[in-house]
Image (cartoon, rainbow, N blue to C red):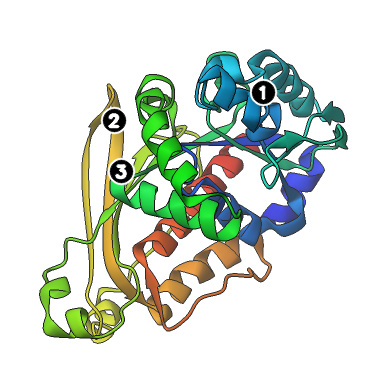
Amino acid sequence: MNLRERIKKSGKVFLVGIAGDSGSGKTTFANAIKNILGDLVSSITLDDYHVYDRETRWKLGITPLHPEANNLKLISTHLMLLKKGETIKKPTYDHSTGTFGEWEEFTPTPIVIIEGLHTFYEGLREHLDFKIFVDPARYIKRKWKIRRDVEERGYNFNKVIEEIIKREPDYKRYIDFQKIYADVVIKILPSSLPSIERIAYLTLKQPELYKVRVILREVSEHAEPIKLALDLSALVKASEKDFAIGFFSDYYYEKLASFIDIDGLMNVDIFSALLDELRKEIEEDIEWNIEKYVNAIEVARLLVCWRFLEMIKSKLI
């Protein structure tokens, strides 16, 4: 019986929490889990549980990052019901208008992703089976938020800038600390490869390069490991683009953790070989759109899925 079938037959609902600031890339990592397990996965955004619409928040001078601007008690109740496999009736929030829509029914699939600002708050994190915190560098997060809110959501540029500045103190007060509860922390930083100083990188249009540090907390001792081998020979042969990977162990907020650093662009053949290891676990194809090279964020998405599958296997023992 493959892993997908085992998840279905277990009758369990696994709740995956993804926390981080607005525009930090939470949905990017949620979609990675959806890529590998398809229709077994559904998701809820905690933005739907805002107490005030956008206009009221501006009048009150309160940001969505403040806990009082969100109905955390209702979220806790809904997580408890979802964990039991029960259907809930939940609010909805429309980002295009900044107002609330009709309440809707939501029936959990075997895996439910809970994505939001306050996902790891007391009373919420206790219901979660796997917790991911996405933590881009400040300037990267600002760039992504401007791109999403202005280009994708059609917000006023000046309003977006004003809100970014206004929200930063609340991020430090109410959001940033949640990473101490995460099983996986994704830190996204500027690339540190020397090659970015080359003339070619200055004169030609290049893909965005990042350095990503994946911090993995120790998993259950009962977890069955999934081998994810990196072929050093293939890595050397496919070194036409700059790529670096590093590893060390240390403590992260009092708990032992593994730190994996990924930088630059990985050849698709090497990435596909890693993806094949996950395919073997679920014994089905995986939809993952990749080009000739993948950046460090894509590699980090794969590593999150790898650790997630290890967690699932430990819960099915």
Q: Relative to residue 185, is residue 151 drawn left or right?
A: right
Local secondary structure at mark 2: strand
CA gap, disc 1 and disc 3: 26 Å
Local secondary structure at mark 1: loop
Q: Which residue is mark 3?
A: 138
x and y percentages locating residue 59 in the rendered image: 58, 22
Q: Which residue is mark 2?
A: 256
The mark that comes first in sequence, 2 or 1, is: 1
| Other residues around mark 3 within 10 Å, as few (<14) / some (14–19) / many (≥20) | few
- Reply above or below: 65 against 294: above
Q: Which residue is mark 1?
A: 52
x and y percentages locating residue 272 in the rendered image: 47, 75
- Reply above or below: 121 against 116: above
Foreground tag (2 vs 1): 1
- Reply above or below: 173 against 146: above
The quadrant of the image that shows the N terminus is bottom right
CA gap, disc 2 and disc 3: 26 Å
**Residue drawn at x 75%, y 23% as measured from the top left:** 78
